[in-house]
Amino acid sequence: MDAIRDTRDVASGDGGAGDSGASPATGARQTRTGAVWRTRKGRRNAEPAGPVGRVFPSVWGTALSGEALRLPHDLQGAPALLLVAYRRAAQADVDRWATFLRDTTPALRVLELPVIPAILWRPLQGWIDGGMRGGVPRPQWSNVITVYEDGATVRAFVGDRGAAVAHAVLLDAGGTVRALETDGFDDDDAARLSATIAELAGS
């Protein structure tokens, strides 16, 4: 899916980079999954897991098909996966996650969330969304939700280290974050996320 590819790189918003995500001691990348930080070298740091275990904030977005949605309220009742992206260059990573999830968990609802928090872009929302529609097959329009006015709320909750990657946010049926992957798609992250999805499906 090309939700961001055919628009200008507007999703970086105010340019805030957030947490660098690197361990001061090892330089290893970190991923927020479960109750602790896990570095790529397997070390465990006793820092909080951020959004994991918390309810996703109430935010409004608009599907490319035109419907307004309030998240996570309109998703409650079944688990869902949000692919949050702040930058056009993150689209390739969004596509990798989306393809993997479509192949392995076809029953799971997966939404792309291009987040564009900068106020200066709001008057151009229609133009930006129109550009996105040009790169997304019409049957997928309802699964691409642009977030403008509440974009800063999403960024503050999920985090943004400035990388051109998708933030994979797994919600349970009540809207609570059960897993968060922020380092970009790879086999280890995908396997870990799949395990959590399976746990939710069996609960």
Image (cartoon, grey):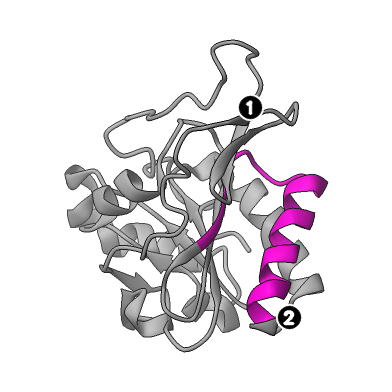
Mark 1 — residue?
A: 29
Secondary structure of the residue carrying numbered label 2: loop
Residue 146 in percent (x, y) is at: 37, 63
Q: What type is the residue that disc 1 sits on? A: Arg
Magenta part of the chain: 178-201
Viewer-proximal residue among 80 and 83: 80
**From the viewer's perspective, is 82 left or right of 176?**
right
Q: Earlier in the sequence, mark 2 or mark 1?
A: 1
State the residue lying farthest toward the bottom: 77
Residue 5 in percent (x, y) is at: 55, 51
Identify the residue shown where x is 67% and y is 70%: 197
Residue 106 in percent (x, y) is at: 73, 80
Q: Is residue 99 visible?
A: no
Q: CA distance from mark 2 to mark 1?
A: 29 Å
Badge 2: how crowded within 10 Å, few (<14), some, or many (20+)? few
Q: Is residue 160 above or below residue 157?
A: above
State the residue lying farthest toward the front: 46
Residue 161 in percent (x, y) is at: 46, 31
Q: How many marks?
A: 2
* Secondary structure mostly taken by the magenta-highlighted segment of the chain: helix
Identify the residue shown where x is 57% and y is 19%: 23
Residue 106's disc number: 2
Q: Is residue 164 visible?
A: yes
Residue 22 is drawn in which quadrant?
top right
Q: Is residue 9 above or below residue 153?
A: above
Picture quarter with the C terminus? bottom right
